[in-house]
Image (cartoon, grey):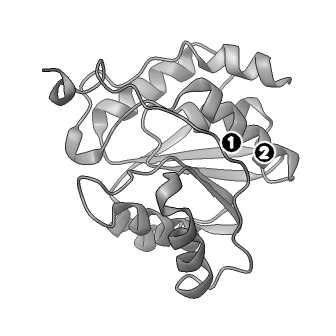
Amino acid sequence: MKFKHLQSLIQDLEHFRKPRMELEQYPTAAELATCMMFTSKETGDIEDKVVVDLGCGCGTLAISAILLGASYVIGVEIDSGAIEVALENCEGFEDLYLDMIQCNLANIAGLRLKADTVVMNPPFGTKTEGADMEFLKCAFQVAETAVYSLHKRSTREYIRKFAMTKLKAVSAKVAFYLCWSLNLSHTLQFFIR
């Protein structure tokens, strides 16, 4: 599958119907998701791999992983409304199956969930300080090989150091840089004046 083809398939996915500000729910833009998922595919971390999408929201990254040839994909999400949307998004594709687990990060360890690769677009930690680091800790518990995660540019060096020192990563690098503006005005009523 080519980059533009994946982007065109996921750009029309349904987004959060009632985004929850405390969970920092916002849609993952199709171009951003496509860049991330193609980067992970090109490094051999998607095709024929077990992939977990932590905080999968409406399923953009999980569905992308399936379309790019992952052997099995699990979405983990706390919000039942987002899970409903993710499963509805899967219905728009023939023979696309996504397993979903509804739980919070604190319960992941008890599940003994393991995957080759974890992909995620976690909260940035602006509403709940440290939420992004909790997602990273969880991702490192689940992933056997690789973690791909989207973060703010301002936290890049901190996250790299955190992964290397606290999470004992073998390596931590920025796979790609994108300047991206999140247009949240139509997503969260909080931003509308």
Residue extending furthest toward the left: 193
Image coordinates of residue 24 in percent, x first then y, are 30, 43
Q: Which residue does the image show at 79% across and 53% down from the upper left?
A: 45
Q: Which residue does the image show at 58% across and 13% down from the upper left?
A: 92
- Residue 133, by quadrant, is bottom left
Q: Alpha-carbon neighbours of circle 1 within 10 Å: few (<14), some, or many (≥20)? A: many
Image coordinates of residue 167 in percent, x first then y, are 56, 81
Amino acid type indicated by mark 1 = Met
Front-most of residues 19 and 69? 19
Q: Which residue does the image show at 54% across and 27% down from the upper left?
A: 29
Q: Which mark is residue 36?
A: 1
Q: Which residue does the image show at 71% across and 65% down from the upper left?
A: 173
Q: Is residue 133 left or right of residue 186?
A: right
Front-most of residues 27 and 114? 27
Quadrant showing the C terminus: top left
Identify the residue position indicated by label 2 in the image.
39
Secondary element at image label 1: helix
Quadrant showing the N terminus: top right
Amino acid type indicated by mark 2 = Thr
Q: Is residue 120 left or right of residue 191?
A: right
Residue 102 appears in the figure? yes
